[in-house]
Amino acid sequence: MRKGGPNMTLQQLNYVVTISETGSFNKAAERLYVAQPSLTAAVKELERELSVTIFNRTGRGVTLTADGLEFLPYARQVLEQYQNLIDVFGNKGTRKQKFAVSTQHYSFAVKAFVEMTRSFDVAQYEFAIRETRTRDVIDDVASSRSEIGILYLNDFNRRAIEKLLSTGGLLFHHLIECKPYVYLWRGHPLAGQKTIRFDELLEYPCLSFEQGDNSNFYLAEELLSTNDYPRSIKACDRATMLNLMRGLNGYTLCSGIICEELNGDEYIAVPYADDANGGDQTMEIGYITRRNNVLSQAGERYIAEMKRYLNG
């Protein structure tokens, strides 16, 4: 390293973030309107000064190294804080608030986002909510793409998920605990029952959210993902899931926390009653943040709205 430490620049950090997003030095150069040799030289100089390799370079593009994965969130945070300074002090005090959340497919998470947005009293903001796969929820928060992530833990997945959170420098914060429910439409033959057993569900399609080609049982959004279901269908979004419930008498196992304002009143949750699988099936739903991260005003409001809805 040079005497006095690395001479790191915001431009170099921006180059690294853009390359990670595009997966290519060439595409990053096109997006940034700079010559590729200049961009490549700037990144190599940064790597030399830090004595690390940020990118693995191959004929098919680039990927982040282990050091690169650790470096990227810090680069994003520095650039974000710099932009916040510009917004506050460089544009006559007019600050554009930014906030993003990534979540498993929970209607209460969307409802809280709606209420948070409605209550925000700034003239300009840039908010985002991403209903996505479990691994993407974790990766989005670890990379600072999202400030908050929403997911659940239970006896089955806790060790695996907590290992991923620890590796990503993330913390899990408790919101609520709930027992499993069977989620289905009101016209389903089992909808009138007080409880539903696993054997009663075997003739109906079990619906679950797609988790990607490299997924494992620990990343499933639904409980009892290791059960042997004679009929199963995977979907990528909540709207499709609801249509399959109605059209095929499908069902899914969930927390039972339903927002009728968003999902409609044609769907209900019936307590799941089957002890044959053993173990504690309680779901602990919570949110994840980066370790030592200070929540933004929007982040604090969002969590407050979630707690208000869940407590109600």
Image (cartoon, rainbow, N blue to C red):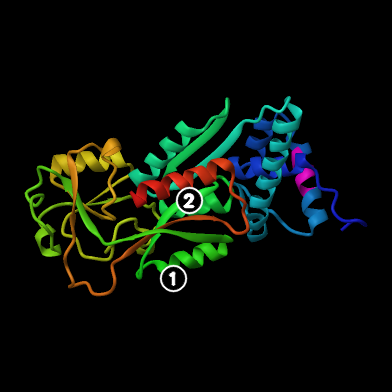
State left or right for residue 2 relative to residue 37. right
Residue shown at 10%/46% (left/top)? 188
- Observer-side mark, 2 or 1, equals 2
- Which quarter of the rendering shows the N terminus? bottom right
The answer to if 64 sits in the magenta stretch is no
Residue shown at 69%/54% (left/top)? 54
Q: Give amino acid for label 1.
A: Arg
Query: Pointer 2 and pointer 1: residues touching (CB < 8 Å)?
Result: no
The answer to if 40 sits in the magenta stretch is yes
**Secondary structure, magenta segment, majority class:** helix
Q: Give amino acid for label 2.
A: Gly
Q: Position of residue 97 (x, y in %)?
A: 59, 34
Residue for badge 1: 159
Q: Residues within 10 Å of mark 2 (few under 14, many from 20)?
A: many
**Whole-Å distance between the Cαs marked 2 and 1?**
18 Å
Residue for badge 2: 149
Q: Position of residue 162 (x, y in %)?
A: 48, 66
Where is 295 relative to 120, above or below? Answer: below
Q: Which residues are magenta?
A: 39-44
Residue shown at 35%/70% (left/top)? 155
